[in-house]
Amino acid sequence: MKKLISAATVLALSLSLGAFTPKNANADTNVESNVTEEQKPIDKLNEALQKEGAQKITEDEYFDLANEALEKARIEVNKQLEEGKEDIKVEEKIGDQDSYGTVTFETEEVQPLPTVKNQLVQNSDYTALAYQNKNYSHTITMKGIGYQFKMRTFGSFTHGKNSKGYAIVKGYTYQCDAQTTWPYSASDIVRADRVDQSYVKVISKGTFTALAQAVNYHGYIDIGLYGTGNYKVLRSKFDH
């Protein structure tokens, strides 16, 4: 009887293992089919370039080209900001190959919070406009084969003249929002440094992590806020 029970047990275990075999086989197949999803962007790009008969490129070279394009976009955005425009979008190709992808720089026109505007402040020495609120929002995107890295830095600041008549940044807020697509995750950090009473520098960093690898990519946006009510992008960059 004891032998019969053992045989039955063995038979049950064999059936159980047999029942799990197809699922395990499918899982192995899925792992193999997802290998391309676990490749770095530069590997996917070079595969595409090879199919096109084009020369491969290193990761350093690729990011250098992307940042050259992004710097060109940053300069154009600042130029348009100086002209009084705020709803701006500049897109640039990365390098001379379509497969390289694009970088985009967007500045969104955000309506300021309700405040008392154009209210006169009087004292014995001068008459000046009261402090006013101004919002800012800048987004950079790097997009290519199998990836998209995007980060937005935004907030508001209060500007005007102090009791001595000097233009100052009285108060400010700042936020950052990094976004990406599968198979990456995104996180971000942001801070603001008051350089002096008329100038605040907002510094932000986005991190894009490959879920299947210990690989990080980064994006950066630095913005200058000024007591005159102007603002501009000081730095925009992606690296690895």
Image (cartoon, rainbow, N blue to C red):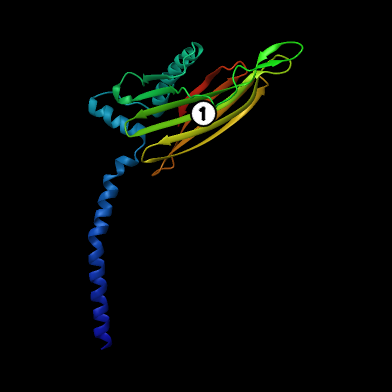
Q: Position of residue 77 (x, y in %)?
A: 46, 16
The residue drawn where x is 24% and y is 71% is: 14
Which quadrant of the structure image shows residue 182?
top left
> Does residue 122 appear left or right of residue 41 in this picture?
right
Q: Position of residue 96 (x, y in %)?
A: 32, 18
Q: Position of residue 67 (x, y in %)?
A: 44, 22
The one nearer the camera, 175 or 134, is 134
> Does residue 46 appear left or right of residue 60 in this picture?
left
Which structural element holds mark 1?
Answer: strand
Q: State the quadrant of the C terminus.
A: top left
The one nearer the camera, 201 or 117, is 117
Total numbered circles: 1
Q: Position of residue 117 (x, y in %)?
A: 59, 19
Q: Residues within 10 Å of mark 1 (few under 14, many from 20)?
A: many
Which quadrant of the structure image shows residue 60?
top left
The residue drawn where x is 36% and y is 29% is: 143
The residue drawn where x is 37% and y is 32% is: 148
Which quadrant of the structure image shows residue 48?
top left
> Does residue 48 appear left or right of residue 122 in this picture?
left
Q: Residue furthest right?
A: 124
Q: Amino acid at mark 1?
A: Phe
Q: Which residue is mark 1?
A: 154
The one nearer the camera, 8 or 116, is 116
Q: State the quadrant of the N terminus.
A: bottom left
The one nearer the camera, 130 or 78, is 130
